[in-house]
Image (tube, grey):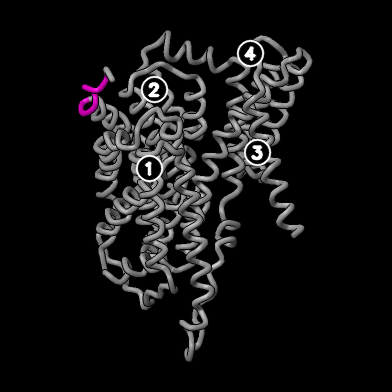
Amino acid sequence: MKKVAHFFFVLLSLFSYSAFSFAEETTSTQLNLTNHWVGYFAAALTVIAYIAAMGEDVIQLKKSKPMVLSSALVWFAICIYYAMHGQAKTASLAFESNLLAYIELLLFILVSMTYLNTMTERGIFDGLRILLLNKQYSYRQLFWITGWLAFVLSMVINGLTVALLMGAIVVAVGKDQPKFIAVACLNVVIAANAGGTVSPLGGISTLFVWQHKILHFSEFFALMIPCIVNFLVPASMMYFSVPKETPDVTQQKIGLRRGSKRIIFLFILTLAITVSSNVLLELPPAAGMMAGLGLLQMFSYYLLKSEKSHFKGIEKRTKTLDIFQSISDIDWDTLLFFYGAMMIIGAIGFVGYLDSIAHFLFGEINVTLANIMIGLSSAFVDNGTLMFAVLSMHPDIPNVQWLLLTLTLGVGGSLLSIGSAPGVGLLGQVKEYTFGFHLRWMPAILLGYFLSIAAHFLINGQFSNL
């Protein structure tokens, strides 16, 4: 009874808090702090935090730590100043607005990564690796297979996960060919970034645009051909440097654990629920993903309860599926980094700096040039952070320019190995794939970048008046 009473007390408290929050109104106005010490403090901490995050491997400090601390200090400074002027509610509402945007992103990625960790634990990706090895493809065939797989999978799966998976396959099949490993990993990075740009399910920057209802889900597929061009141009040039030999076949056998195929089905069903609930019911993508997490949790419960009858009379050959273990194995450093990045960019926007930048980029210079420049800068700065910054500027641009921005930010990170999560992930995993090797192919990648922009305007230019 005590537990029931406690539950209803918490529920009543939540409803009371919500009612109070919605009933409360404020007539405060936002202050311009661009020429104030608070603004200078926010800008300085932002620069310091990003430098520390970019130098993660040098200073041995996880990238999330400086970002989370800096964002907290910046918002405390803003809120203290507003409180001193009797407008504490204005600052707190701005903080809550940015927090809500992050929570939607967090829940979406949390469910996606949980499914991927669960499929990894069930041996699904290991089975894919063994399947490719047993087919006796040549290195040149494997170059295209791993590239296209990275492109297609990244349309529905996080690009970092796709890159690490394909990287493991490339290393396994090319253990005697370091040149193949290096060029195939570079191809995987480019393909993962290009594929993730086609769909809101695969890239952070596209997910942001979808969540903010700038573009509908189906509109992103207008970038399919430009993204294929971006992938194929450098891949076709790198192809001739791939060895012609065929790797030795593996002696391993594919061993999928119980429930693996049904988990794949549940993942596909979760994506279908997410897209359909957003298009038909206008629910945020996180709502559909959380429904899918509930399905996965119930399925794990079914596996646990049916285990005894399933293994009756035979030796137990698989461990129990633990969904909470899959959740704990998520890359929390990256998720917390995005928290810090989104909150600190939100603070910079609230101070007033983003309005000034937006006035220059989308008012004083050509919008197309501005979007191309922003895309090129994603070779140095995370594309999700840049997209959130642009969204915070609220630029009044047509759909064709939003698609261009999505394209350039999605594929611009391929220019350098440190420009995207897939590149950074493989830098740490594969010794043959280096910053210098990637840099040697940058002219080919840059050619693909500009040709993809040309393809976009050739195909989608007629939608400029939307």
Question: Percent from the top left, x then y, of residue 281?
Answer: 39, 38
Is 89 placed left or right of 223 in the picture? right
The secondary structure type at the circle numbered 2 is helix
Q: Nearer the viewer, mark 1 or mark 4?
A: 4
Question: Percent from the top left, x then y, of residue 129?
Answer: 37, 65
Residue at mark 3: 15
Examine the rendered structure and indicate whether residue 390 appears above or below residue 175: above
Lower sequence index among marks 2 and 4: 4
Q: Residues within 10 Å of mark 3 (few under 14, many from 20)?
A: few
Q: Which residues are magenta?
A: 458-464
Q: Real-space Cα distance between discs 3 and 1?
A: 39 Å
Task: Say which of 424 and 122 sits in front.
Answer: 122
* Quarter of the image that includes the C terminus: top left
Task: Say which of 387 and 79 sits in front.
Answer: 79
Look at label 1 and name its amino acid.
Gly
Q: Real-space Cα distance between discs 2 and 3?
A: 44 Å
Q: Are marks 3 and 4 in contact (CB under 8 Å)?
A: no
Task: Say which of 164 and 359 sits in front.
Answer: 359
